[in-house]
Image (cartoon, helix red, strand yellow):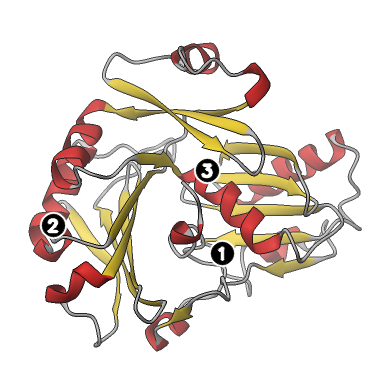
């Protein structure tokens, strides 16, 4: 095992067999500080497990990720330590969880020059490649940049896999899981490490989506209330659904309850079965990894 990272999560069902990967789906989520995997057995339509690897000493004074090695090297190291990841799977999907992304309505999107949208919103670096995802349910495009070195490593290890963005995956996952459950505006708050996403969705269309950096729960609460006030939503009446790395018993939910009266945890996709080992995790955690295969991305 490399000294550069730690195995933060290792929940693999005993029915998982490395020689049987041709019947499995592999979903991968990569960001600047961690790599996560989920494995789906297509024969039983059941998730067999999750793994997560986290870079050691990955945070600096700003609270933002400052990895000690390129992400491409990180991915290669993890796949070397777990050689079954290089096996042939029935389906492999990979998403990049980066902060430089922007949504563009389809009517305004120029497919021939997606780089312009990144240049307009962010400082474009030479060592990055720009990609775009078509979010068909919303008729919009997610434009994002990915470090060259990560793209190169991902293409070498998973040559038939197209990289998409984690926020595209999140948006489609919420649409799939909640389009028939709600008919009034709901706020979805997805908490990651140092980043969180806010989405307002009413079961038919998305009216707002944005990603913010944060260092403490107070900042999450401040930005959320600010967004709701700017959009003329009353925090005491609009429902809030929490997703991601959130403990519903303490921390951020306790603070949010001071301002938001209706808070619930996200639910797992009922279209799948789940290994009993995943019962150790709250249902709102790993939301994107456990919904990747239901998305059209």
Residue 20 left/right relative to 26: left
* Residue 3 appears in view: no
> Contact (CB < 8 A) between labels 2 and 3?
no
Q: Residue at x 84, y 33 (%)?
A: 230
* Residue 140 appears in view: yes
Q: Which mark is residue 246?
A: 1
Residue 244 position (above or below residue 150): below
First of labels 3, 1 by sequence position: 3
For numbered disc 1, what is the local secondary structure? loop
In the rendered image, which quarter is residue 233 located in? top right
For numbered disc 3, what is the local secondary structure? helix
* Residue pointed to by mark 2: 86
Q: Nearer the viewer, mark 2 or mark 3?
A: 2
First of labels 2, 3 by sequence position: 2
Q: CA distance from mark 1 to mark 2?
A: 31 Å
Q: Nearer the viewer, mark 3 or mark 1?
A: 3
For numbered disc 2, what is the local secondary structure? helix
Q: CA distance from mark 3 to mark 1?
A: 18 Å
Residue 125 position (above or below residue 278): above
Q: Residue at x 49, y 50 (%)?
A: 296
Residue 164 left/right relative to 233: left
- Residue 53: x, y in percent? 26, 59
- Residue 112: x, y in percent? 45, 13
* Residue pointed to by mark 3: 167
- Residue 175: x, y in percent? 65, 54
């Amino acid at each position: 095992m490399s000294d550069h990272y730690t195995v933060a999560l290792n929940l693999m069902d005993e029915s998982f067999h490395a020689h049987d990967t041709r019947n499995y789906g592999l979903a991968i989520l990569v960001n600047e500080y961690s790599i996560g995997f989920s494995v789906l057995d297509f024969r039983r339509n059941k998730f067999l497990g999750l793994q997560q690897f986290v870079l050691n000493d990955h945070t600096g004074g700003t609270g933002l990720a400052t990895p000690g090695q390129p992400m491409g090297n990180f991915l290669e190291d993890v796949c070397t330590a777990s050689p079954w990841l290089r096996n042939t799977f029935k389906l492999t999907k990979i998403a990049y969880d980066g902060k430089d992304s922007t949504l563009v309505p389809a009517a305004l999107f120029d497919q021939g020059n997606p780089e312009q949208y990144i240049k307009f919103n962010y400082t474009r670096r030479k060592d990055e490649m720009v990609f775009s995802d078509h979010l068909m349910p919303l008729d919009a495009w997610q434009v994002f940049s990915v470090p060259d070195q990560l793209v190169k490593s991902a293409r070498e290890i998973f040559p038939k896999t197209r990289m998409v963005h984690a926020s595209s995956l999140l948006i489609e996952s919420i649409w799939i899981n909640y389009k028939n459950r709600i008919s009034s505006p709901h706020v979805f708050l997805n908490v990651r490490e140092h980043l969180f996403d806010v989405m307002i969705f009413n079961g038919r269309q998305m009216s707002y989506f944005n990603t913010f950096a944060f260092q403490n729960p107070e900042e999450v609460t401040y930005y959320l209330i600010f967004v709701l006030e700017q959009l003329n939503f009353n925090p005491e009446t609009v429902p809030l659904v929490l997703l991601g790395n959130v403990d519903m018993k303490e921390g951020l939910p306790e603070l949010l309850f001071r301002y938001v009266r209706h808070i619930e945890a996200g639910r797992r996709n009922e279209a799948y079965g789940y290994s009993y080992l995943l019962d150790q995790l709250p249902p709102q955690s790993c939301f994107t990894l456990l919904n990747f295969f239901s998305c059209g991305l």
